[in-house]
Image (cartoon, rainbow, N blue to C red):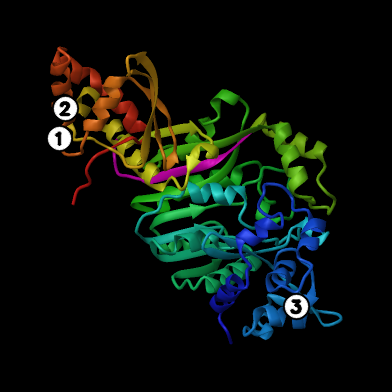
């Protein structure tokens, strides 16, 4: 039997790539125009056949698919349950197969592709929440990692290169089947799949160095869709997950949890998640990516998924709105809670409302740096002491200046803006002295020495300048611009 890793290679060789799928209308932030996509793939080209069966959910002649995949045997897909026979020598795929970065993922076809509502054990693909969590997941060499609620297995597969042993769990056996296909297709050998709810399948395996979870966090009336959390009341599932997580983390371990949570007051959006954690021996950074009113939230999910209640009837907008009102949910927020287990008498909780549009690449290095800095600041009683440290300017940043001609060929700086080019930009405006100071911070020389030299040159009091620098250094450290040399 051919391996699915061979299948992945053949798909790419025959042109079944994200770029070609984008060319027929996929991945553009809106539903694909099926008629146009079918017209665009109406030829005997191998990737057209592959796009029809594995992306557009169109049965194709078995002989045409065999030619497109040769020498990979169709029986190797049938025996795994990926391919099923249809009348008239046609074959159909049981899963949509989607390239995501370097990975090949398997998901169920959506209602727009099948013409049917979501099945109770539907397996979601890589959507906005998955991408958000992946962007905000910390990446480091972890010995033991848990992907809780793995779904199609994306987060486990994405972490396989920097984690030793990975356990991926899900309550849905169909999801585990799809994850198994993805793990084999991507030639990953350090992921173990287990069925069960929350931490039940791994209670004896703790602690973990890294826990990642994109749970079914949708806040709705009760329904039967496992992937959207049909049995939960409000944001209870996320609340339980946050309560349980600290006890499963190793000292210094991180958890990255995607979540929806509701709140009555727009200004107090971080209050309930902070209360859920209630310290728990952890530091935490709550990163909110989006806030919606209750009406906006209902409208979004009414358009994205036709959800049936326990009686089989579709949940109406009125019943959904009423359920949010009973919860006191005037607003619903979406984001990621990043937690680090740390033995200390001083723990910190931070909450920021940010935009993924202002984030470049993954934010892992930046988040790890900010955790280190925020911890140092939490332990520091006098911010002026920060000048005693050998701060260095973090990599991947840029200083953008606007200059104005002064006549005679001279220029004066009107504005200097510093921004990070990996992770969140956290743009700050600097005066010329601050910009110059940052250029001299080398990560080896105590900052007070550099500040004192600059103050003397400007005929200012060095001691006063050093003492006054605490607030500036603290602010840039909180934003991740500064870093200390790592111990070797």
> In the rendered image, which quarter is residue 453 located in?
top left
Q: Secondary structure at mark 3?
A: strand
Find the residue positioned furthest to the bottom: 1
* As drawn, 288 above or below 146: above
Please tell me which residue lies in front, 370 or 275.
370
Q: Secondary structure at mark 1?
A: loop
Residue mark closest to the camera, 2 vs 3 = 2
How many neighbours does mark 1 have within 10 angstroms: few (below 14), some (14-19), or many (20 or more)?
A: some
Q: Secondary structure at mark 2?
A: helix
Residue mark closest to the camera, 1 vs 3 = 1
* Cα separation between marks 2 and 1: 7 Å
Q: Position of residue 219 (x, y in %)?
A: 67, 42
Q: Which residues are magenta?
A: 332-345
For the N terminus, the quadrant is bottom right
* Cα separation between marks 2 and 3: 70 Å
* As drawn, 463 above or below 54: above
Q: Position of residue 259 (x, y in %)?
A: 56, 44
> Could you say which disc has been placed on residue 450 in the image?
2
Residue indicated by mark 1? 445
* As drawn, 63 above or below 202: below
Please, what is the dominant secondary structure of the magenta stretch? Answer: strand
Q: Mark 2 and 1 residues: CB-CB less than 8 Å, in contact?
A: yes
Task: Tell me what residue is drawn at x 86 percent, y 80 percent.
Answer: 87
Task: Tell me what residue is drawn at x 74 percent, y 58 percent.
Answer: 110
Residue indicated by mark 3? 84
Of labels 2 and 3, earlier in sequence is 3
Q: Is residue 75 visible?
A: yes
């Amino acid at each position: 039997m051919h391996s699915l890793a061979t299948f992945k290679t053949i798909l790419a060789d025959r042109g079944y790539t994200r770029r070609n799928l984008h060319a027929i209308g996929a991945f553009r932030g809106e539903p694909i125009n099926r008629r146009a996509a079918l017209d665009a793939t109406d030829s005997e080209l191998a990737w057209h056949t592959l796009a029809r069966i594995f992306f557009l959910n169109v049965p194709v002649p078995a002989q045409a698919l065999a030619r497109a995949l040769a020498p990979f045997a169709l029986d190797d897909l049938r025996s795994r349950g990926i391919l099923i026979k249809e009348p008239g020598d046609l074959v159909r795929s049981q899963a949509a197969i989607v390239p995501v970065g370097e990975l090949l993922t398997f998901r169920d076809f959506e209602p727009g592709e099948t013409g049917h509502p979501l099945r109770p054990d539907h397996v979601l693909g890589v959507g906005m929440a998955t991408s958000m969590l992946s962007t905000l997941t910390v990446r480091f060499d972890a010995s033991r990692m848990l992907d809780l609620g793995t779904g199609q297995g994306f987060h486990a597969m994405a972490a396989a290169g920097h984690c030793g042993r990975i356990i991926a769990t899900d309550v849905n056996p169909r999801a585990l089947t799809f994850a198994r296909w993805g793990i084999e297709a991507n030639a990953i050998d350090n992921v173990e799949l287990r069925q069960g709810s929350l931490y039940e399948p791994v209670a004896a395996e703790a602690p973990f160095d890294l826990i990642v979870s994109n749970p079914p966090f949708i806040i709705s009336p009760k329904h039967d869709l496992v992937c959207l959390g049909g049995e939960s009341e409000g944001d209870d599932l996320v609340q339980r997950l946050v309560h349980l997580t600290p006890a499963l983390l190793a000292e210094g371990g991180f958890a990255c949890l995607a979540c929806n949570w509701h709140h009555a007051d727009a200004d107090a959006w971080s209050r309930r998640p902070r209360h859920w954690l209630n310290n728990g021996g952890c530091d935490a950074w709550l990163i909110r990516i989006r806030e919606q009113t209750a009406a906006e939230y209902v409208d979004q999910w009414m358009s994205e998924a036709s959800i049936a209640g326990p009686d089989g009837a579709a949940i109406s907008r009125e019943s959904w709105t009423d359920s949010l009102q009973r919860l006191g949910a005037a607003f619903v927020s979406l984001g990621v809670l990043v937690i680090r287990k740390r033995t200390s008498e001083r723990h910190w909780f931070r909450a920021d409302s940010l935009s993924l549009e202002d984030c470049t690449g993954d934010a892992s290095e930046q988040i790890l740096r900010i955790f280190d800095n925020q911890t140092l600041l939490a332990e520091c009683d006098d911010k002026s002491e920060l000048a005693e440290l050998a701060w260095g300017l973090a990599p991947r940043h840029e200083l953008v200046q606007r200059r104005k001609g002064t006549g005679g060929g001279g220029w004066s700086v009107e504005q200097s803006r510093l921004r990070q080019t990996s992770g969140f930009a956290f743009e700050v405006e600097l005066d010329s002295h601050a910009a110059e100071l940052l250029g001299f911070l080398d990560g080896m020389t105590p900052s007070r020495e550099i500040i004192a030299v600059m103050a003397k040159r400007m005929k200012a009091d060095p001691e006063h300048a050093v003492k006054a620098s605490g607030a500036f250094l603290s602010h840039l450290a909180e934003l991740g611009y500064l870093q200390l040399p790592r111990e070797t």
